[in-house]
C-alpha cells in the first residue's frame, strides 16, 4: 500500500520531536498503523534556523497554506501554536478534506466547536491528544476507556512549566524567574509564558477535559483562572507544616447546579498521590461513578513526550482512513447532537475550604476580631498557626485553615478583614481540596 503523506506545520520543540519519533520508530509505527507514514513537507517561519531534527527529504516552505492545500498530503500536523492564524490554516486543511492532528490547546479550547463541526461535515478527523497533559493519553482514557462511567469530577496538574516552578521553589529554594527561564530553555513553556504562570494554558486544557468528561461544548471563556505568581516561599513552607502541598490544579466538577471549571493554586493533603507529582510531570485524577478514582501520570511537556501523543494520534488517523466517518469516536466523546448545555457555575457559588495567610498586629484581641468576621459569614476555622518572626516587632504572620464555605462568603469576609486596622496589607487566600 502507498505510504500516507504527512505535512507538518512547525518544526520547533514538538514539530521536531514528532519528526524524530516518526523517523526513529518508523518500522514499529508502520506495523501498528498498517501503512508507512512519510513526512513530505513542513512549514516554518525561518528557513535558515538550525533544527533539532533531520529535514533532508522534507520539502520546506514558509507558507503553511502550501501544506494545507497540497493535494498529495493526507494528514496535517499543526504544531505551530497560536490561535487565529492556526485556525485559518486548519480550516483550510479541513476544507481540503485533510485530517488534522494538533498539540494546540489554545486552538481547540477557543475554536474547537467550529473545527469539529467542519471536520464532521467534511468526514475528516481533528485529533488533539497532545493538547492536554503532554504525553499522557488522557483524552483516549476519558473518551474511550471510561465511556461506561458518569464522570463526577476530575482534577489535574496540567501545566508542566508551573509544576516545575513550584517544585524547584519548594525543593531548592530557587527564585521564580530563574526557574521559569530554565523551563523556557527546556522547551516546556508556551511562546508567551504568562499562559503557563497565569493558568491560561491549564484553563485551555481543563476546558477540553471538562467537555469530553461531561459532554458539554467547549467554553473556555467561562473558566475561572488564577495563576501561581503570588505564591511565596512562606506559603509553600507553611502549607508543608500543616501537612499540605501547593499545586496548580485544574478542577472540573459536575454538580446539580452546573459545572465547576476552575484553575488555581490549591493546597492538597500530602498523603494524596497527586500532591507528590513533581517537576514537569503532570497527573490527572478522574472520578467515575463505576470505576471510582483513576490517576494518570506522565511527562506534561517536552519534545518527545508530546511527540508520543502526536504520533499516536497520527496512527489512529491512519487506521481510521478507510473507516466509515459515522463510526469514529466522536471528537468530544459524546455524539455531537447529544452534547448538553449545562451551565458553568460562577466562582462565587463554588464551595471549597481555604488557607488564609495575613500579617497582623501582635496584640490581644486581634484574633477575636478576625474570627468574629468569619463567624458572621458562618465560616468555621479548622486550624490556626501563628509564627514568631524575629525583628518583626509588633507584627506577626498568622495562618488559618477554614472548613468549606461559598466563595462569595469568603470574599465578603476577606474585604472586612482587610479593612481592619490590625491587619496589614492583603490576605493571601489559597483554595484547598481533599480530593477524596
Ligand atoms: P515552538 O518550539 O515555538 O515551535 C513553533 C514552530 O512553528 C516553529 O518551528 C516556528 O517556525 C513554526 N511557526 C510558528 N508560526 C509560524 C508561521 N506563521 N508560519 C510557519 N511556521 C510557523 O513551539 P512548540 O513548543 O513546539 O509548541 C507548538 C505547539 O504545541 C503549541 O500549540 C504548544 O502549545 C503545543 N505544545 C507544546 C508542548 C511543549 O512541551 N513545548 C507540549 C504540548 C503542546 P520557526 O522555527 O522558523 O520560528
Ligand atoms: N507549556 C505547556 C506546559 C506545554 O508547560 O505544560 C505542554 O502543554
Image (spheres, helix red, strand yellow):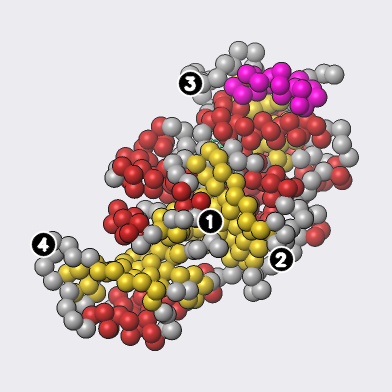
Above or below, comparing residue 217 to residue 354 in the picture: above
Residue 272, image x and y in percent?
49, 55
- 265 lies left or right of 306: left
Closer to the camera: disc 3 or disc 2?
2
- Please state the horizontal and vertical placement of residue 101, each as a whole percent of the image: 68, 36
Look at the image and give the residue range highlighted in magenta.
20-41
Which tag, 1 or 4, sits closer to the chain's start? 1
- Labels 2, 4: front one: 4
**Mark 2 neighbour density, 10 Å: few (under 14) some (14–19) many (20 or more):** few
Residue 62: image location, x then y, percent: 58, 25
Task: Check the picture and name the quadrant holding the N terminus.
Answer: top right
Which comes before the other along the chain, label 2 or label 4? Answer: 2
Ligand 2 has an atom within 8 Å of the beta carbon of the residue at disc 4: no
Q: Which residue is mark 1?
A: 250
Q: Which residue does the image show at 64% across and 74% down from the upper left?
A: 257
Instruction: Compute the Cα span from label 1 to label 4.
Output: 39 Å
The residue positioned 46% from the left and 59% from the top of the image is 268
Image-quadrant location for residue 261: bottom right
State the residue position of label 2: 341
Residue 391: mark in rendering = 4
Image quadrant containing the C terminus: bottom right
Q: Does the CB distance between marks 3 and 2 fall below 8 Å?
A: no
Q: Closer to the camera, 42 or 300?
A: 300
In front: 5, or 368?
A: 368
Which residue is identified by label 3? 49
Amino acid at each position: 500500500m502507498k505510504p500516507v503523506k504527512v505535512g507538518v506545520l512547525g518544526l520547533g520543540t514538538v514539530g521536531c520531536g514528532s519528526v524524530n519519533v516518526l523517523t526513529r520508530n518508523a518500522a514499529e509505527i508502520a506495523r501498528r498503523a498498517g501503512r508507512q507514514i512519510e513526512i513530505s513537507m513542513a512549514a516554518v517561519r525561518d528557513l535558515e534556523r538550525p533544527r533539532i531534527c533531520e529535514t533532508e527529504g522534507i520539502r520546506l516552505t514558509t507558507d503553511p497554506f502550501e501544506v494545507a492545500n497540497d493535494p498529495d498530503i493526507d494528514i496535517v500536523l499543526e504544531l505551530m501554536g497560536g490561535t487565529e492564524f492556526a485556525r485559518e490554516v486548519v480550516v483550510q486543511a479541513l476544507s481540503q478534506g485533510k485530517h488534522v492532528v494538533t498539540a494546540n490547546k489554545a486552538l481547540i479550547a477557543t475554536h474547537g466547536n467550529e473545527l469539529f463541526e467542519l471536520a464532521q461535515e467534511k468526514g475528516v478527523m481533528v485529533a488533539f491528544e497532545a493538547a492536554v497533559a503532554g504525553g499522557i493519553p488522557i483524552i483516549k482514557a476519558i473518551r474511550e476507556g471510561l465511556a461506561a462511567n458518569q464522570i463526577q469530577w476530575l482534577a489535574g496538574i496540567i501545566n508542566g512549566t508551573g509544576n516545575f516552578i513550584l517544585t524547584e521553589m519548594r525543593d531548592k529554594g530557587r527564585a521564580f524567574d530563574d526557574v521559569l527561564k530554565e523551563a523556557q530553555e527546556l522547551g516546556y513553556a508556551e511562546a508567551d509564558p504568562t499562559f503557563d504562570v497565569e493558568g491560561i494554558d491549564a484553563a485551555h486544557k481543563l476546558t477540553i477535559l471538562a467537555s469530553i468528561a461531561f459532554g458539554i461544548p467547549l467554553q473556555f471563556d467561562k473558566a475561572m483562572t488564577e495563576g501561581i505568581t503570588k505564591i511565596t516561599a512562606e506559603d509553600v513552607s507553611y502549607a508543608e507544616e500543616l501537612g499540605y502541598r501547593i499545586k496548580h490544579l485544574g478542577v472540573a466538577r459536575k454538580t446539580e447546579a452546573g459545572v465547576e471549571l476552575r484553575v488555581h493554586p490549591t493546597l492538597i493533603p500530602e498523603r494524596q498521590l497527586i500532591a507528590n507529582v513533581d517537576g514537569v510531570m503532570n497527573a490527572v485524577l478522574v472520578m467515575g461513578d463505576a470505576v471510582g478514582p483513576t490517576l494518570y501520570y506522565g511527562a506534561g511537556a517536552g519534545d518527545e513526550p508530546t511527540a508520543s501523543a502526536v504520533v499516536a494520534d497520527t496512527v489512529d488517523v491512519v487506521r481510521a482512513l478507510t473507516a466509515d466517518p459515522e463510526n469514529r469516536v466522536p471528537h468530544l466523546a459524546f455524539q455531537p447532537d447529544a452534547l448538553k448545555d449545562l451551565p458553568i457555575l460562577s466562582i462565587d457559588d463554588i464551595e471549597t475550604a481555604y488557607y488564609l495567610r495575613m500579617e497582623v498586629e501582635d496584640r490581644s484581641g486581634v484574633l477575636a476580631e478576625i474570627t468574629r468576621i468569619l463567624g458572621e459569614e458562618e465560616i468555621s476555622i479548622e486550624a490556626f498557626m501563628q509564627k514568631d518572626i524575629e525583628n518583626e516587632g509588633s507584627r506577626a504572620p498568622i495562618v488559618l485553615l477554614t472548613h468549606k464555605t461559598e466563595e462569595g462568603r469568603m470574599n465578603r469576609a476577606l474585604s472586612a478583614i482587610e479593612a481592619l486596622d490590625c491587619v496589614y496589607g492583603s490576605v493571601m487566600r489559597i483554595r484547598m481540596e481533599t480530593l477524596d
